[in-house]
Image (cartoon, grey):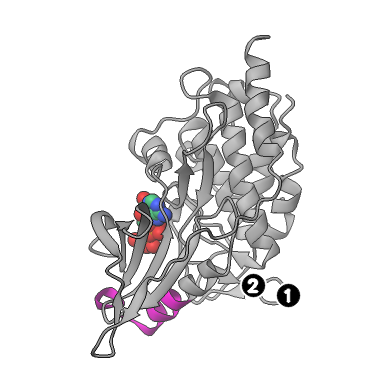
Amino acid sequence: METEAPQEEVKLKRIRSLPSPEKPIQANHCLCLTSAEGKTILNPRYEILSTIYDQPASPSRVLLVKDTETDSLVILKQLLKCKILSQAQRVSAVREIEIHQSVSHLNIVTFYDSGETEEAYNMLLEYLPGYTYFTDKIEVNNKPFNLKSDGGVQKLKSFSYDVIQGLEYLHSHGIIHLDLKPGNLLLYTDVDENEYPLVKICDFGLSRRADATGYAIIEKKCGTDKYVPPEVTDGAMISVAADMWSLGLLLHNLAVGYTPHAMKWSPGKPIPFHNRHWRKYEGTGLKEFIEACLRLNPEERIASRDALLHPWLSFNQ
Ligand SMILES: Nc1ncnc2c1ncn2[C@@H]1O[C@H](COP(=O)(O)OP(=O)(O)OP(=O)(O)O)[C@@H](O)[C@H]1O
Ligand SMILES: [Mg+2]
């Protein structure tokens, strides 16, 4: 035990001591050009290499592209107009771009540029090679964090810290992400070997801006069933607390490999924490943190800014 502790502390100190979570946009990108015929077209500087994501039912298409000017990889996310069938979907596409391009934080996928062509609403984003890490872990392999083979509790703490820092930034800017789940968390792996990879939040497709009173109205229930908070219903008024609910379920899932629903839990009842799955987190504060996120009444849920001070995120234990 004595030999493991100092090594973990070194890694976590690096994350704790980052000078500022804000990160400036580095490259000068130019996603679209005007053709000789006066049409807006994609800049041929960006060479399409492969398709990362394309589902028949979704207007989103995610392509890996090479920026031939800087010889670096970037992402082209397209919202295809042929699959945008309603005015609500159009509003949502424009809102996704407006919100994502307004944010800049180390724990949020960097937005480089955007442009509307005949075919699509296009976004040029930072490429994160670890884009399947969380979905593979949870939805494909159903493999929670464990003590030895995968870095264990300290790694999960570091990942939690990243997500909560990203959320705190969004919430302090009045933005509700509204779709926090494994598929919308990507891993930035270009770090020193004594550092944990960074988690970055992507996909502002369902995000909303809260008004001055802290609420946004959603027309229809939306989100990914397993992670949707109870207050998210047709025509509901929602707040940043919605993300804290999804965070609670996400952490539960990452910690033990299932959400409380799998234990026949329904919101409002005490969450079952079975000792055999939670023993490794004893004394870390994770159980208590998850409970604070999963309060049925959104007003009673822990806020992201308080979450950063919770014992679960104290790195000295
Ligand atoms: N910047 C990125 N770097 C690497 N992979 C990415 C990036 N952005 C998205 N992806 C990959 O593409 C997938 C889909 O992207 P995203 O979540 O933004 O689309 P979406 O709008 O959710 O689509 P849908 O509405 O169909 O769920 C992600 O789960 C991830 O695997
Ligand atoms: Mg997504």
Q: Quadrant of residue 118?
A: bottom left
Q: Quadrant of the N terminus?
A: top right
Residue 87 is inside the magenta segment? yes
Q: Quadrant of residue 102?
A: bottom right
Residue 41 % position (x, y):
29, 78
**Label 2–label 1 contact, CB within 8 A:** yes
Residue 291 % position (x, y):
66, 42
Q: Main secondary structure of the magenta part?
A: helix
Give, as a three-letter code, the residue at label 1: Thr
Q: Which residue does the image show at 72% across and 59% down from the upper left? A: 299
- Residue 213, disc: 1
- Residue 210, disc: 2
Give, as a three-letter code, the residue at label 2: Ala
Q: Can residue 120 be seen here?
A: yes
Residue 312 % position (x, y):
70, 35
Q: Residues within 10 Å of mark 2 (few under 14, many from 20)?
A: some
Residue segment shown in magenta: 81-94
Q: Quadrant of the C terminus?
A: top right
Q: Can residue 204 be seen here?
A: no
Residue 219 % position (x, y):
50, 77
Left or right of 22, for residue 146 = left
